[in-house]
Image (cartoon, coloured by chain):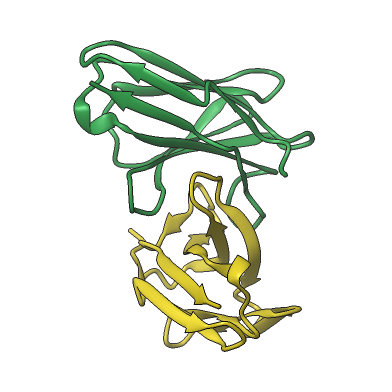
Amino acid sequence: ETGVTQSPTHLIKTRGQQVTLRCSSQSGHNTVSWYQQALGQGPQFIFQYYREEENGRGNFPPRFSGLQFPNYSSELNVNALELDDSALYLCASSLEGAGNTEAFFGQGTRLTVV
Amino acid sequence: GENVEQHPSTLSVQEGDSAVIKCTYSDSASNYFPWYKQELGKRPQLIIDIRSNVGEKKDQRIAVTLNKTAKHFSLHITETQPEDSAVYFCAATDNYGQNFVFGPGTRLSVLP
């Protein structure tokens, strides 16, 4: 098991609502990346945080936003939820950026939008 | 941007046989290629990775090969066991490493 933990594990929200997902990175890791994994597909990159700054963003609208805290834990916020936002949201922690170094995933938060 | 393709999408093998999954990538700047195994309802787990300065890497029954010229890399599993059954994802990233680009996955079934 990795030291990456996410909360909550499951969540049901109504269309139009807002949601906050949380991720605690593995000890010693300073970088957190967030991914969206739709059923039957590979994870899609949302954004990455390195030392509390956004360090890259995928093809997701601005209603997907994030934060990283001084202890390197992170939040993913999604506003104005849409049905298509239903997915498994994964965070991955790594040291000094996800490229060229191992990234370890949390167990994910399964979000259902109804 | 980077694009990763993966084949086959499903693969069934008999226990004890070998399995091979192939991926291609588009960005010649990519230099790190991890493979993840994801069992149903669980997190993706890193099983092996390779960097672009290496052509092959092996870890017990698992090996990965990389052909930089052709921009493809492959996962080889020998002596497959039922517990190898899962979805396998390849990924690629570059030195700027802001993100992994994942392939669509291969569902491997090892039949007893």
User: Residue lying furthest front in this view?
Assistant: B112
Q: In this view, does A54 lie above or below A15?
A: below
Is any part of residue A66 visible from this angle? yes
Image quarter hosting the C terminus of chain A: top left
Chain that is green in the image: A
- Residue B10, picture quadrant: bottom left
| Residue A16 image offset from top left, x and y in percent | 21, 13
User: Residue lying furthest top in this view?
Assistant: A17
Left or right of residue B100, residue B26 in this image: left
Residue nearer the viewer, A62 or A2: A2
The residue drawn where x is 41% and y is 77% is B11
Q: In this view, does A106 lie above or below B17?
A: above
The residue drawn where x is 34% and y is 71% is B9
Q: Is residue B57 above or below residue A35?
A: below
Left or right of residue B30, residue A39 in this image: left
| Residue B44 image offset from top left, x and y in percent | 55, 51
User: Chain B in the picture: what colour?
Assistant: yellow
Residue nearer the viewer, A59 or B112: B112
The residue drawn where x is 70% and y is 43% is A95
Residue nearer the viewer, B9 or B83: B83
How many callouts does the rendering have? 0
Is any part of residue B25 visible from this angle? no
| Residue A99 image offset from top left, x and y in percent | 58, 54
